[in-house]
């Protein structure tokens, strides 16, 4: 580019001068506003020819100081930053060949401050087309350069932060529903480059395409609310990358207003929270596993405690039973020695009398002696048989089976039918259920209780015996009731003792009710007697498992 002289018409000289004056004033104002300076360079003398005040201020000098300090090419290079001198020299040389140049470089002012300069130079030719010099425009854009560098630094920092923290940034046009900007980190979270993502996503439908199908409708609604409500946005959802990998993302955004105050964009951050979600799931799994282990251990502990309590209860029961059995054994030993001694004393006594009666040849007395001896022997035999039977209970028991109590009671009634008829007893038998047990032993129970009821009817004019059952606390409760002589309340607990006899005048060994009690207890039940007192009859009740 060359600057050629302009031929002026004398008639228009004043107008042209006025126009040039205006241009000069405009040029001065432009220098001040845009902060650039103007200079002219003399190629022939290789020095600065002239400059404006704004040019001198760039170097922190006056115009005269600039003319003095730039009166040679070497002095000019001294004011340029050492790292940029070669760049400036090359640009200057290009200026000679191309007619102009544009270059950015740094200068070092005399106070040591480094400033960033942008220079545009234009070569000036004479009428013969020879280079005579150049004119240049210099602008100090240090502040803008520093801002650009700061922005570049921040951009680099953002990219580093994106890489380290797995986040990305975006700007979304709420009206057009497209991305106007996405950061490299944003694209990377989707497994793509920026260009690859923008080519793939052209609408909100495309944006939702890689979202997991279970989260798609939820996210579509969330985006719709963002558009309608113009409020801050938050969502967590899953995506499936092009390589098939599933990732969890957290999206947070806020709406911004344009210069006219209208909400037009949403800017936000996207963060990969897959590891966090995996850790949360691991914690939930660990918690559930721990709760399951605690529950199992608690159940095991509860089972152990229950088992120990059962064992303790069983041991206490066994201990109580042993104590009762020891006490019963002591009573048994005492009673047996006493009750067996009675018939033996009788036999021994009548054997002595028998010898005397034989010597006296008293036949009537001899017969009487033999009768007493036989009666005592029979008593001893019955007593020993009952004791043997009592000892067998609990040791010799049949397998538990379903027992029809009505059938068992009927057999017992048949066995005492003659006694019932002889006493003209009215017998009432109610419905009886079936239970699990040993039928032979249960027959002994009903038979002993019936025999006991018949024995103690006393002189009742209208004797009556009832047999029945009812349910009580999950057990079958049977009873044998009579309207006989009754039992005083003080003796209710004693009637089941070994060799306990309510009336010594009534035939018996005192083993029957003890035998019944043992059989019922072996079956897991209980037995007791109820009576309102003498003359009021008795009611023997016992329980059996259903």
Image: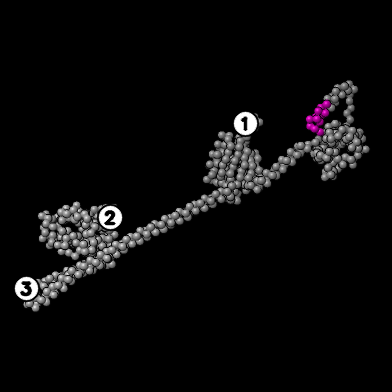
- What residue does disc 2 label? 475
* Mark 2 secondary-structure assignment: strand
Cβ atoms at labels 1 and 2 below 8 Å apart: no
Whether residue 25 is visible, yes or no, is yes
Which contiguous range is marked in magenta?
A: 25-36
Q: Sequence order check: which comes first, mark 1 or mark 3?
A: 1
Q: Position of residue 50 (x, y in %)?
A: 89, 33
**Residue 435 numbered tag:** none
Mark closer to the chain start, 2 or 3: 3
- In this figure, which colouring scheme has been used for the structure? one colour
Q: Which residue is mark 1?
A: 262
Apparent side of residue 198 relative to residue 102 in the rendered image (left or right): left
**Image x and y of residue 477, in percent:** 24, 55
Q: Foreground residue, 511 or 121?
A: 511
The prevailing secondary structure element of the residues shown in magenta is: helix
State which mark lies toward you, 1 or 3: 3
**Residue 364 circle label:** 3
Q: CA distance from mark 1 to mark 2?
A: 85 Å
Find numbered disc 1 in the image and state the secondary structure of the residue it sits on. loop
| Residue depth check, mark 2 versus mark 3: number of the one nearer the observer | 3
297 vs 350: above or below: above
Quarter of the image holding residue 411?
Answer: bottom left
Any magenta on residue 35? Answer: yes
């Amino acid at each position: 580019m060359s600057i050629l002289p302009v031929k002026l018409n004398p008639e228009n000289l004043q107008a042209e001068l006025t126009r040039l004056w205006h241009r000069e004033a405009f040029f001065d104002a432009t220098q001040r506003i845009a902060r650039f300076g103007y200079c002219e360079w003399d190629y022939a003398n290789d020095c600065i020819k002239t400059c404006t005040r704004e040019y001198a201020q760039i170097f922190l000098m006056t115009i005269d100081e600039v003319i003095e300090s730039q009166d040679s090419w070497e002095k000019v290079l001294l004011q340029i930053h050492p790292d940029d001198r070669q760049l400036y020299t090359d640009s200057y040389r290009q200026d000679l060949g191309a007619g102009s140049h544009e270059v950015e470089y740094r200068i070092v002012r005399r106070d040591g401050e480094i400033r960033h300069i942008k220079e545009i130079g234009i070569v000036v030719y004479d009428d013969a087309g020879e280079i005579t010099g150049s004119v240049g425009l210099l602008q100090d854009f240090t502040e803008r350069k520093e801002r650009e560098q700061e922005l570049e630094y921040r951009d680099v920092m953002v990219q580093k932060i994106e890489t380290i923290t797995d986040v990305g940034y975006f700007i979304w046009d709420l009206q057009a529903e497209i991305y106007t900007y996405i950061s490299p980190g944003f694209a990377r979270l989707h497994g793509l480059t920026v260009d690859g993502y923008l080519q793939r996503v052209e609408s909100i439908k495309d944006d939702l395409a890689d979202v997991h199908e279970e989260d798609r409708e939820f996210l579509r609604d969330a985006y719709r609310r963002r558009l309608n409500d113009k409020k801050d946005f938050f969502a967590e959802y899953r995506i499936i990358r092009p390589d098939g990998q599933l990732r969890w993302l957290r999206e947070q955004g806020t709406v911004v207003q344009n210069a006219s105050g209208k909400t037009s964009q949403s800017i936000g951050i996207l963060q990969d929270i897959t590891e966090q979600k995996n850790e949360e799931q691991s914690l939930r799994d660990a918690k559930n596993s721990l709760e399951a282990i605690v529950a199992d251990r608690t159940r095991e502990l509860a089972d152990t405690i229950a088992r120990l309590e059962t064992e303790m209860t069983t041991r206490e029961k066994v201990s109580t039973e042993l104590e009762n059995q020891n006490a019963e054994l002591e009573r048994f030993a005492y009673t047996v020695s006493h009750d067996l001694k009675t018939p033996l004393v009788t036999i021994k006594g009548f054997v002595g009398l028998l010898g005397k009666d034989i010597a006296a040849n008293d036949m009537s007395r001899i017969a009487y002696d033999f009768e007493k001896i036989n009666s005592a022997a029979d008593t001893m035999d019955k007593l020993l048989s009952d004791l043997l039977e009592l000892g067998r209970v609990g040791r010799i028991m049949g397998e538990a089976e379903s027992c029809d109590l009505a059938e068992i009671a009927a057999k017992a009634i048949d066995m005492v039918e003659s006694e019932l008829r002889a006493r003209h007893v009215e017998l009432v038998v109610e419905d009886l259920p079936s239970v699990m047990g040993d039928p032979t032993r249960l027959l002994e129970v009903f038979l002993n209780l019936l025999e006991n009821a018949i024995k103690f009817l006393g002189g009742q004019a209208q004797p009556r015996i009832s047999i029945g059952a009812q349910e009580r606390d999950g057990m079958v409760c049977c009873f044998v009731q009579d309207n006989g002589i009754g039992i005083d309340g003080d003796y209710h607990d004693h009637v089941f003792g070994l060799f306990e006899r309510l009336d010594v005048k009534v035939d018996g060994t005192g083993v029957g009710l003890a035998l019944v009690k043992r059989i019922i207890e072996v079956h897991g039940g209980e037995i007791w007697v109820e009576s309102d007192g003498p003359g009021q009859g008795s009611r023997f009740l016992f329980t059996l498992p259903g």
